[in-house]
């Protein structure tokens, strides 16, 4: 695995720090949030109990009651209900079994009046006819107060028919309107009537003048209208504020979801004024992206609602405490709401407490938040720096590797100067050590390269000594036996001489190459002439030499003598490997304007492991046992000549395996 | 009176071998191990032929210096280099200093003797007035095989023995291609074929020095060389 991937892996490990940090923040946040929830619930429970004590009315008997919304504006009693628009939610609806008759009751009160609005839907309207007594036999609404029993009916739009009050008291108290589907009655009653209880019912008669009503709906028990407690709603409870934690809003709801009382205000609006700083933005973003709890829709929590139906209160009405989080109206805060049941099972209603909180509770704990944020940023920066450094290190090592790989050419020559790093660290040391090592290798290779020619040179003198002595010896009259030995000695010396010549030959050719002068000549004529000469060689007697050349002349800048020597070597090789009656093909062709000269021959394939080294000095693929010593210098010379002409030699087996080929690319000398 | 041959060679064995062989042939031989003793002896008497090794003891080029000094004293003294150093550079240096031939130590004793005999023959021929010796003429080329003199357009071309025989072998049958082996036989030298190439180059240069339009020696790539018919 490359180093940079390993470093990447280690860096992944470093990425654990931010992740762990984040998990920690998350945990802390969850813990803090839980603590907040618990605190608010605890307050809720305490306040709930206090409420029941403070305001016994909350714990009034029975579940059936009517609620009158406290309002601070006057309603006009005129049969038009436009001014009731904001109070639509107050509707208490009654319906008979056949769904023929529907009564919707709205109650509101200000310091002077109790306003009542009754919408009646009746499929078979029977308007009152005649005097007040006739009211008893028409479709009507019956109101039961502590003092009075009022009957109201609607004849036409305008003042309603009202009975049951002492004469002269009813002026302007009731109004009504009607349409084909039913009628609507508005009524106001002075608060001086001690309206602690109220009963209301709508009565439908089947036909005009019928004695018995068809249906009776409203606050009805056993076929009779009864009065139920009347309770104000939307009451501000100043006493409650003292109990509430700072910035908390409390709302008491009845079992049928009417907001009975409220106290305190949420600090939502106040926070909106705060400046939009980066830190706040960051907090909000982090929070919304990663930490935000499941939010509930803020709509059912509006402060001006007359009735409240939220997840928490519904649970509280079932007797279970519940908490919930929702976004506040500003970006940076959330609202925690907790609902507790009033009474053991919520039979007296529920108390909803709401409190605004910073988005990230952690930040309320300034020190811890700062620490974590700082830690997170530090880890991120450290990771980036570490990653960058690892990349740089990896780059340097890779560069060193590339330099080391390319420092020596395939024949062991140093290619230019190895780049020595000036850095005072381990990689720099490594680079310098490499450079020293390469210098030594270069010197050693240079020594090896010159060894052959030096050796042959040094051996020439002792060889001449032996040879001269043998020459002299043979001129003496030697006994026959001694002559045998002298001949053996001579054959050995000759062979040694051959070896020495071959050894120095490569060196001599290298020198010749250094001094070679380029001339322009026709390669085609050169090849044709050479092949003609090869055909006359004794070694070629039983072998077929083919020659393929292009039709036109191929002009080349080069050294024909050296090229000829190279070709000689190749043909010499080919001849020695080709079996009797085999063929040799010498081919000159143009590939992309560059001449290629190849010699291919029938014969055994090249061993694959040797193909790359074939053109190096002292490498031979010949099997031992040949009579003439073979030093493997031929193809080395071929390579030198080929390189002089700007090309490289190639060797390989013919595709069908019947022989081998050697090819020279000859772009020409510069 | 036997001819006196001086051998300047630092290697005692080789010196002794050559001395023995040449003495066996009837020459008088004086052998010297270094330049100093040789020069001291030559100051008294010049030999008839000098065989010089290039490297002499601690003087790597001592042979060249000796050759230069001797040539300064005598323009006609026959001198041969006999050295283990076989590079073109050494050969050219030696011949440029005025040596008549440059042989490598690979040469066998019989071959060496043949070259010495030839060289003496040439010296002999030069001493005699031009007579009815065998002349080979082809166009502007005139070869006197006894005196081993080569003329081109009447001007003397200074050729070494080896070069002379190469030119002789080619010019005897103009138009015939002589391969390297044939030229080597003709020159009676045992050098590798690449050396023939450098001999041919030098021959061309010598002729070109006299006649810039000289192009009588044809290279037949892969075959050999020929004298233009």
Image (cartoon, coloured by chain):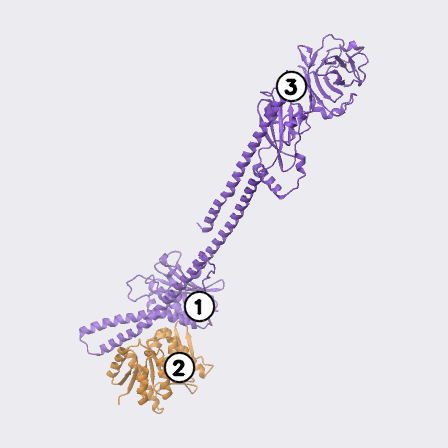
Chain colours: A purple, B orange
Identify whether A317 is placed above or below B176: above
Q: Residue furthest top?
A: A211
Q: Chain of mark 2?
A: B
Which residue position is annotated with label 1? A644
Q: Position of residue A621 (x, y in %)?
A: 34, 61
* Callout 3: chain: A
Q: Is residue A434 above or below residue A195?
A: below
Q: Label 2 crowding class (10 Å Cα cut-off): few <14, some 14-19, many 20+?
A: few
Identify the secondary structure beneath mark 2: helix
In the image, which is nearer the foreground, mark 1 or mark 2? 2
Q: Could you say where residue A6 lies in the image, as x and y percent from the top left?
A: 45, 48
| Residue at the spot 47% in from the left edge and 60% down from the top edge | A422
Nearer the observer, disc 1 or disc 3?
A: 3
Q: CA distance from mark 1 to mark 3?
A: 116 Å
> Are callouts 2 and 3 both on one chain?
no
Q: What number is the disc on residue A440?
A: none
Residue bearing the label numbered 3? A56
**What's the chain of the residue with tag 1?**
A
Earlier sequence position, callout 1 versus callout 3: 3
Callout 3 crowding tier (Cα within 10 Å): few <14, some 14–19, many ≥20: few
- The answer to which image quadrant residue A50 occupies is top right
Q: Nearer the viewer, residue B17 or A238?
A: A238
Q: Which mark is residue B96?
A: 2
Q: In the drawing, does residue A308 fall left or right of residue A75?
A: left
**Height in image: B162 above or below A456?**
below
Under circle 3, the secondary element is helix
Picture coordinates of residue A109 (x, y %)?
A: 73, 21
Judging depth in this view, the residue of A175 and A70 nearest the camera is A70
Q: Position of residue B41 (x, y in %)?
A: 30, 87
């Amino acid at each position: 695995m490359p180093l940079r991937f390993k470093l990447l892996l280690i860096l992944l490990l470093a990425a654990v720090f931010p992740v762990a940090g984040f998990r920690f923040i998350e945990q802390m946040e969850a813990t803090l949030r839980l603590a907040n929830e618990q605190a608010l619930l605890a307050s809720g429970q305490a306040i709930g109990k206090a409420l029941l004590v403070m305001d016994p009315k909350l714990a009034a008997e029975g579940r059936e009651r009517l609620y009158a919304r406290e309002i601070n504006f006057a309603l006009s009693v005129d049969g038009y209900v436009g001014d009731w628009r904001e109070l639509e939610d107050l509707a208490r609806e009654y319906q008979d079994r056949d769904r023929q008759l529907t009564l919707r009751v709205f109650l509101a009160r200000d310091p002077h009046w109790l306003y009542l609005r009754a919408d009646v839907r009746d499929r078979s309207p029977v308007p009152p006819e005649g005097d007040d007594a006739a009211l008893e036999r028409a479709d009507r609404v019956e109101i039961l107060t502590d003092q009075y029993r009022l009957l109201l009916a609607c004849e036409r739009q305008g003042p309603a028919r009202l009975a049951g009050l002492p004469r002269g008291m009813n002026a302007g108290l009731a109004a009504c309107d009607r349409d084909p589907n039913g009628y609507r009655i508005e009524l106001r009653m002075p608060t001086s009537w001690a309206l602690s209880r109220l009963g209301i019912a709508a009565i439908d008669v089947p036909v005009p003048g019928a004695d018995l009503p068809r249906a009776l709906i409203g606050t009805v028990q056993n076929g009779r209208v009864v009065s139920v407690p009347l309770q104000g709603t939307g009451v501000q409870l100043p006493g409650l504020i003292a109990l509430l934690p700072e910035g908390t809003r409390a709302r008491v709801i009845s079992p049928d979801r009417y907001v009975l009382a409220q106290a305190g205000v949420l600090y939502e609006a106040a926070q909106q004024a705060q400046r939009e700083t980066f830190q706040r933005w960051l907090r909000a973003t982090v929070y919304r992206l990663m930490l935000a709890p499941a939010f509930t829709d803020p709509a059912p929590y509006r402060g001006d609602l007359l009735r409240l139906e939220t997840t928490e209160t519904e649970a509280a009405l079932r007797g279970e405490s519940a908490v919930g989080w929702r976004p506040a109206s500003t970006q940076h805060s959330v609202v925690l709401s907790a609902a507790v049941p009033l009474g053991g099972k919520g039979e007296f209603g529920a108390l909803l407490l709401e409190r605004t909180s910073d988005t990230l509770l952690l930040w309320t704990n300034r020190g811890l938040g700062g620490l974590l944020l700082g830690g997170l940023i530090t880890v991120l920066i450290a990771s980036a720096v570490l990653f960058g450094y690892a990349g740089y290190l990896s780059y340097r090592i890779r560069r060193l590797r590339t330099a080391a790989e390319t420092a020596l050419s395939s024949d062991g020559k140093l290619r230019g100067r190895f780049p020595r790093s000036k850095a005072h660290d381990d990689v720099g040391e490594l680079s310098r050590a490499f450079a020293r090592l390469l210098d030594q290798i270069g010197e050693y290779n240079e020594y090896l390269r010159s060894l052959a020619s030096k050796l042959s040179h040094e051996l020439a003198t002792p060889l001449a000594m032996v040879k001269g002595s043998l020459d002299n010896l043979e001129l003496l009259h030697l006994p026959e036996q001694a002559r045998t030995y002298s001949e053996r000695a001579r054959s050995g010396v000759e062979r040694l001489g051959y070896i020495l010549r071959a050894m120095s030959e490569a060196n001599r050719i290298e020198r010749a190459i250094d001094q070679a002068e380029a001339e322009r000549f026709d390669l085609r004529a050169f090849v044709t002439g050479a092949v003609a000469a090869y055909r006359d060689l004794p070694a070629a007697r039983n072998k077929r030499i083919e020659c393929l050349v292009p039709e036109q002349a191929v002009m080349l800048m080069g050294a024909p003598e050296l090229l000829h020597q190279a070709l000689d070597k190749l043909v010499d090789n080919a001849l020695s490997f080709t079996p009797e009656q085999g063929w040799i093909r010498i081919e000159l062709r143009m590939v992309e304007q560059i001449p290629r000269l190849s010699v291919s021959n029938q014969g055994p394939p090249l061993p694959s492991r040797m193909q790359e080294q074939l053109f190096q000095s002292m490498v031979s693929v010949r099997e031992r046992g040949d009579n003439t010593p073979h030093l493997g210098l031929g193809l080395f010379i071929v390579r030198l000549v080929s390189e002089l002409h700007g090309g490289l030699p190639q060797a390989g087996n013919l595709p069908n395996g019947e022989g081998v080929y050697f090819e020279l690319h000859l772009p020409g000398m510069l | 009176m036997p001819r006196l041959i001086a051998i300047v060679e630092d290697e005692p064995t080789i010196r002794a071998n050559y001395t023995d062989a040449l003495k066996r042939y009837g020459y008088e031989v004086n052998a010297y191990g270094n330049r100093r003793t040789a020069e001291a002896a030559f100051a008294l008497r010049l030999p008839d032929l000098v065989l010089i090794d290039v490297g002499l003891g601690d003087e790597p080029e001592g042979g060249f210096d000796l050759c230069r000094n001797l040539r300064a004293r005598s323009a006609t003294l026959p001198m041969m280099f006999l050295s283990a150093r076989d590079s073109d550079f050494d050969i050219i240096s030696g011949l440029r200093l005025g040596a008549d031939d440059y042989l490598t130590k690979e040469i066998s004793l019989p071959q060496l003797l043949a070259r010495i005999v030839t060289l003496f023959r040439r010296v002999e021929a030069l001493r005699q007035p031009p007579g009815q010796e065998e002349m080979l003429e082809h166009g502007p080329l005139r070869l006197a095989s006894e005196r081993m003199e080569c003329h081109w357009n009447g001007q003397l071309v200074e050729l070494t023995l080896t070069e002379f025989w190469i030119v002789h072998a080619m010019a005897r049958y103009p138009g015939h291609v002589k391969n390297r082996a044939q030229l080597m036989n003709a020159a009676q030298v045992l050098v590798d074929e690449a050396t023939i190439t450098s001999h041919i180059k030098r021959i061309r240069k010598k002729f070109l020095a006299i006649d810039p339009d000289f192009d009588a020696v044809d290279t037949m790539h892969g075959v050999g060389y020929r004298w233009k018919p």
